[in-house]
Amino acid sequence: MKKDKNKLRSHCPVNYGLEAFGDRWALLILRDIIFRGKRTYGEFLSSEEGFATNILASRLDHLVEQGILQREGDKTDGRKSVYTLTEKGFDLIPLLFEMILWSAKYDNQSEAKRIAPLVELIRKDNRRIRKISQTAKEQVKQGIALAREYSS
Amino acid sequence: MKKDKNKLRSHCPVNYGLEAFGDRWALLILRDIIFRGKRTYGEFLSSEEGFATNILASRLDHLVEQGILQREGDKTDGRKSVYTLTEKGFDLIPLLFEMILWSAKYDNQSEAKRIAPLVELIRKDNRRIRKISQTAKEQVKQGIALAREYSS
DNA sequence: TAAATTACTTGCATTTTGCAAGTTATAATT
DNA sequence: AATTATAACTTGCAAAATGCAAGTAATTTA
């Protein structure tokens, strides 16, 4: 990963995104939260792509530092930390949708085939999904709800 | 990078995208082609983010293997190779647009501030940009033309 | 109170990256 | 025609990042 010390290589918007979330593992964490409802270290660890424990920890730290995730202690189990999206994190959902659309088109073994209705919905109107409700957080919460509904 | 040997970690559409193009340097190459009109190894090397020569070569190879770029010899200068987008590559433009929108919102030093009209256009209707014309290649060529026009 | 769990950290071998310095093929210059 | 320059890489090697396996510390459950 990067040293994070606020020294971006450039403020090109593509580069900014890459430095903030554009890391293989960081994006898989976001996927797990958004599409799979995961929230804790242990849940992320169980992903099929196989996080190394130290890498997972460093990426969670990074996403929290970037303001994309927030970490809170679990109310009922003091051992657990719960990671949830901030608004900045929620706003990455349309980007993940675009990745899904692209992969659904070009990976002929894509698991997206199993969620064809969602993919079709996104393809037809990604923007409408974003606009379902007004406030930023509500808007994308509904996007997530939709995503979960269709992918389950 | 990966060993590329067709052994994806998973066919999750997010993971597929990450393995195909989701690498810091690969996406910067695509940015250079799409928004800056670059086409040759030497032009990519001059990017402000600083490609290492071997990494640039390996990423270009990877993108060609993935069918995202195509490499051709320059007609008039036999030393040069020209890299251009395939349809599969063109189809990544909406994803880059989403990155730009996100970074424009959250990086207060974003260079996207300089291309506010384009950002606003994308924000208002990313999908319309994609639909400007019918054929896949033409459609996004016009997207590129628009992007260049507004960012220059 | 002992055994599990959860969220990490540490040590170390392997892999990837980043420079600097080649190399090869073609093109331009003298 | 010979020399120099340019374009696109490759190679070697040190430094950094990654991937395991094996801890550790703070709860929680049995």
Image (spheres, coloured by chain):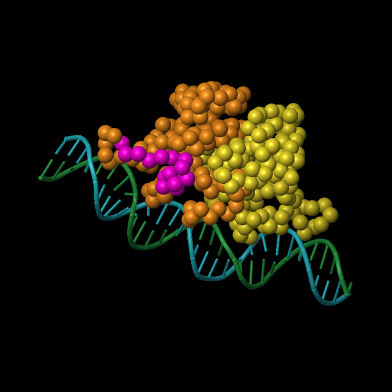
Chain colours: A orange, B yellow, C green, D cyan
Expressed as whole percent of the image width and height from the top left, the position of residue A31 reads 47, 36
- x, y percent for residue C27: 83, 62
Residue for point 60% across, 41% down? B104
Q: Is residue B9 visible?
A: no
Determine the residue positioned at 60% across, 24% down: A125
Quarter of the image for residue C6 reads: top left
* Relative side of D5 to A9, left or right: right
Task: State the residue in front, C24 or B19.
Answer: B19
Q: Give the magenta part as a residue range.
A: A59-74
> Is B9 covered by the magenta stretch?
no
The residue positioned 60% from the left and 49% from the top of the image is A11
A64 inside magenta stretch: yes
Where is residue A78 drawn, in percent x and y?
26, 39
Residue A125 visible in this rendered orientation of the protein = yes
Identify whether A122 is placed above or below A27. Answer: above
- Residue A38 in the image: above or below residue B55: above
